[in-house]
Image: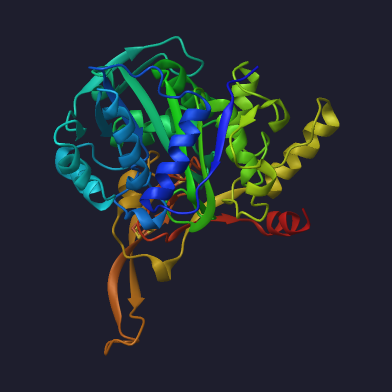
Amino acid sequence: MFNPVALESCSSYEYSTVKKSLDQAIADIDGLSFVKPGMKIAIKANLVSAMAPEKAVTTHPALLKRLCELITEKGATVIIGDSPGGLYTPSFVRNVYKSCGLLDLEKEFDKKVTLNDDYSIKNASYAGKSLKNFIYTGWLSNVDAIINFSKLKTHAMMGMSCAVKNMFGTIPGTTKPEYHMLFPNETDFANVMIDLNEFFKPDLYIVDAIDGMEGNGPTAGEKRHIGAVLASKRPYALDMVCADLIGMTIKDVPTLRVAFENGLGPESIAEVKIVGGLSPSLAKIPDFKRATIHQSITFDGDGFINHMKSAALKLAFNTKPQVKKSECIGCKKCYETCPANAITMVPYKKASKGNSPNQGATRNISIPSIDRSKCIKCFCCQEFCPKGAMKVQENIIGKVLRKIK
Ligand code: SF4
Ligand code: SF4
């Protein structure tokens, strides 16, 4: 049997609402029983990008604040951190803290809560399915316990970004894209996520699913109200419940499939014990827009026919990153992030938009051009484009089939 998953309703980020829901979700599973006086607790939040809380990209500060209160009331101290996409340096990460609305937390809790400023890198050896020797952000080795506080969003490569995927932020900033080169296969990459969860073994997982992200996630999609806070002591059943809320199953989320194959997670929502005050059927959002991903439909069972049918569908649903020129600002983030060196920046004359006096005039910028023979379809360029200009493009057969489905 898998660890129970607490599911509580939470209609907004208003303090009293958050307090009631988060306290109840944690109480449902006795989630903070491991916290003792004097302990140093790391909250591994999702701080993937320097974006304001209302963009629904990062773990909301109202939830973090209430969790800090609960932990410090028990006599422990808290360090909040993450390795965002981009540089893992004090100035870069501090700017992320600021944009994500976290700086006030330090002031409010008077040294009992700090934002991580340890940028050391540690080496690890681990007999994981994918990971053997790897480096990680050292702040996590100087704490007594870890709490993983993720955000429910779509993800172009993994279908969904939630509790399991959040541990990828333990890999230092610019090293992350290298993992896409090392593990370009979807299963191997999903195993990296599982390995990180098993290596760090957080004591508690919480999901901010009050406002999630649909569509072009995990950074450039649209905010979608879900209205829930979830918690569990393990991530796999928790992610299964989150997937179910947004209309996904094990077939849509490689980390769920791999966790099941490794004997760590459930095969379906039916195997999960859900506790708490929110009925799963009422919480579901069946029309939640997915990220456009490849390999999202397979036929059950072994055998040549099913294999060929699945292979044909994978071809039909073949996707690729494609820049929308009118939205590109030429910032080069995609070029700098691409682990396969598949992107070159090429000159482009961009027309000015809007009501400015220069409307219609053109200016010279550089936009990305992708060498398809080098592209490994990791979608890092899509994930880290600050303007959402890098889209996931599906071919025409895929579009038609998805409409029919
Ligand atoms: S072009 Fe984009 S999807 Fe392709 S390898 Fe580079 S970052 Fe990954
Ligand atoms: S596609 Fe996005 S990341 Fe790349 S240059 Fe344009 S705006 Fe920047």
Residue 90 found in image quarter: top left
Q: Is residue 342 above or below residue 71?
A: below
Residue 339 found in image quarter: top left
Can you give x and y, in whole percent of width and height, for residue 170 in the image? 34, 28
Residue at the location (42% across, 46% down)?
18
**Figure coloring:** rainbow
Q: Nearer the viewer, residue 365 or 302?
A: 302
Left or right? Give the position of 57 relative to 272: left
Can you give x and y, in whole percent of width and height, for residue 27 in the image? 48, 29
Q: Does residue 151 appear anywhere in the picture?
A: no
Residue at the location (66% across, 41% down)?
280
**Ligand 2 is found in which quarter of the picture?**
bottom left
Q: Does residue 94 appear anywhere in the picture?
A: yes
Can you give x and y, in whole percent of width and height, for residue 237 in the image? 59, 27
Q: Is residue 115 above or below residue 4?
A: below
Quarter of the image with the N terminus is top right
Q: How many marks?
A: 0
Left or right? Give the position of 49 relative to 287: left
Residue at the location (58% across, 39% down)?
242
Residue at the location (40% across, 35% down)?
149
Q: Nearer the viewer, residue 297 or 27?
A: 27
Q: Nearer the viewer, residue 259 or 37?
A: 37
Can you give x and y, in whole percent of width and height, for residue 297 in the image? 71, 42
